[in-house]
Image: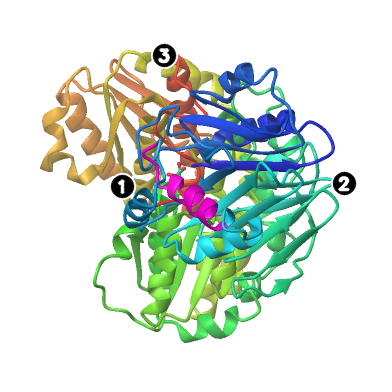
Amino acid sequence: MCGIVGAVAQRNVVPILLEGLQRLEYRGYDSAGLVVIQDGQLQRERSTGRVADLRLKTTGTHGTLGIAHTRWATHGVPSERNAHPHLSNNLIGVVHNGIIENYESLRTRLSAAGYVFTSDTDTEVIVHLIHSHYKNGASLLDATRTSLTELIGAYALGVIAVDNPDQLICARRGSPLLMGVGVGEHFIASDVSALLPVTNRVIYLEEGDVAEIERQSYRIFNASGAEVTRPVQVSKISNESVSLGTYRHYMQKEIHEQPQAIADTLESVCNSTSIIPGIFGAEAAASFDAVNSILILACGTSYHAGLVARYWLEEIAGIPCTVEIASEYRYRTSVPNPKALVVVLSQSGETADTQAALNHAMALGHVHTLAICNVAESALVRLAKLRFLTRAGPEIGVASTKAFTTQLVALFLLTLVLAKQRGRLTEAQERQHLNDLRHLPAATQKVLDLEPKIAKLAEQFATKQHALFLGRGMHYPIALEGALKLKEISYIHAEAYPAGELKHGPLALVDKDMPVISVAPNDVLLEKLKSNLHEVRARGGELFVFADANTHIRSEDGVHIMQMPEHAGYLSPILHTLPLQLLAYYVALQKGTDVDKPRNLAKSVTVE
Ligand code: G6P
């Protein structure tokens, strides 16, 4: 989703802006642009396509104040004229992330006042609005603040004026934005990774904050206009953790980081023989005592993690659980149960639908709320009463991998805490589960060692148009996740079904051109799954089975078995995710797609 970078410095900021944009590429975008003040003029360059194209266009551009943007089209097609920054009368420049809901009425008003619109974007109303106040004598800060009172919607903004070459104004409401603090220079960005080459000292702006930034100083005002102090924090994200190293793609790197990410996420329990509610926050014990059901809200891959958790929560903790797609829940008339624990799952913590769903739940009277999230400073973490931070580290590839498996680890911990509180866990069982969790990093590493075999298997998918994924029980959501990964990055149409549903429809599609990928853990449903696989084979379908060590399913003509190193019991969904991630990755390599930045998709969907 859109990315913003801005800088006010004593040196030329164009390389800083370009490097920042490049580092925000993973968020997803279709065009990019920047504007600096050069020789007393606003010097703007924009291009559709990659930041690399913008770099070529800006070889002669320089300036000590500038703002830059990667755009993900919402209002208006991806094109150069719609790319940011937008300008008003060659005086004001603006970059914007978010959506302005009342842009049509503002556009009508501003057009009547003589403003000529040169794009189809909602953003252009902001720049003309600021201009309309600025030309009447308001300071840039006040012109921006007055304009914000007229906007309905979400925004993160960077604003500059040509006759004010030492000042950068920024603001946020509903979209992420932070400030970077350097020595004699300051920056803004959508996330910290963009600024790591220049500083790791950051200020996380809060909802409704507006800041006036100069080289040596800055002032921050809160939503009610009062000047406030926000802490300068030293980001723990290192430059190294966002660099590719020897890997070919971030997705590959992040798949391989899973043993470490899981180990880090388990840190709070690594040396203990028992598990306590406090790992979810100081008030967790009281909340967990008060609740009688769980409502999980999430989008995309995070939603799939929620679906797995439902099996665990009901079976191990004996607590009713529903899982809902956030964008559906927020608009549905549901029957609230104030005694439910609302759990929001999100890698980024900035997904607009998940935020809106949590706000909706709170408006309905839900008071017990928990965010399981990978970004400590995110909106969701701030909003929820309880929190658990997964420790996956920055995830750059658009297709989520290590964030998913660490979410599962967090959800399993939640299951254990709730089971224990409900008297459903003996000490011996608790110890066993904790031992199994501690073994996970080693177990996931063994699965990753299958990589060369999976890469070979993937060659058979190069010419396929469709694929069907099957799973049963708690592995059905893993089949969903495998299908999602494959379609996201290889553009092969993939669907997932609970294997028992095969004969109620999808079997009609099975022929030699439709590969069927099945997750076959060694559990109570194995024999049933084997019958489903026979149904496929009998129709000429080619089978690719990820089978546990002693499932006794053998490779034969048309049946390709990938033997998993071990069976992990309840934690098996985590292990079975890995080969499906690798399969999607290697099929995408076969297809030659842009693995880390698949077409039309964004990492962090901060608009509805
Ligand atoms: C986007 C990403 C997915 C992600 C989903 C939810 O669609 O491309 O990878 O699963 O958003 O994101 P969240 O940050 O809330 O987990």
In the figure, is residue 23 to the left or right of 103? right
Task: Relative to 39, say whether 53 is above or below.
Answer: above
Q: Main secondary structure of the magenta part?
A: helix
Q: Which residue is mark 2?
A: 184
Disc 2 and disc 3: Cα gap in Å?
54 Å
Q: Is residue 7 left or right of residue 287?
A: right
The picture places residue 303, in percent across and down from the top left corner, at 40, 53
Residue that appears at 20% across and 29% down: 536
Residue at horizontal 45 percent and vertical 46 percent from the top: 123
Nearest-to-viewer mark from 1 and 3: 3
Q: Are marks 2 and 3 in contact (CB under 8 Å)?
A: no
- Image quadrant assignment for residue 172: bottom right
| Element class at badge 3 | helix
Other residues around mark 3 within 10 Å, as few (<14) / some (14–19) / many (≥20)? some
* Picture quadrant of residue 592: top left
**Magenta span contains residue 120:** yes
Mark identifier at residue 217: none
Residue type of the residue flagged with mark 2: Gly
Residue of label 1: 472
Local SS, label 1? loop
Q: Amino acid at mark 1?
A: Arg
Residue 40 position in % (x across, y down): 71, 34
Residue situated in front as seen by the camera: 345 or 358: 358
Three-letter code for the amino acid on which mark 3 is drawn: Glu
Q: Which residues are magenta?
A: 119-133
What residue does disc 3 label?
459
Whether residue 390 is visible, yes or no, is no
Secondary structure at numbered mark 2: loop
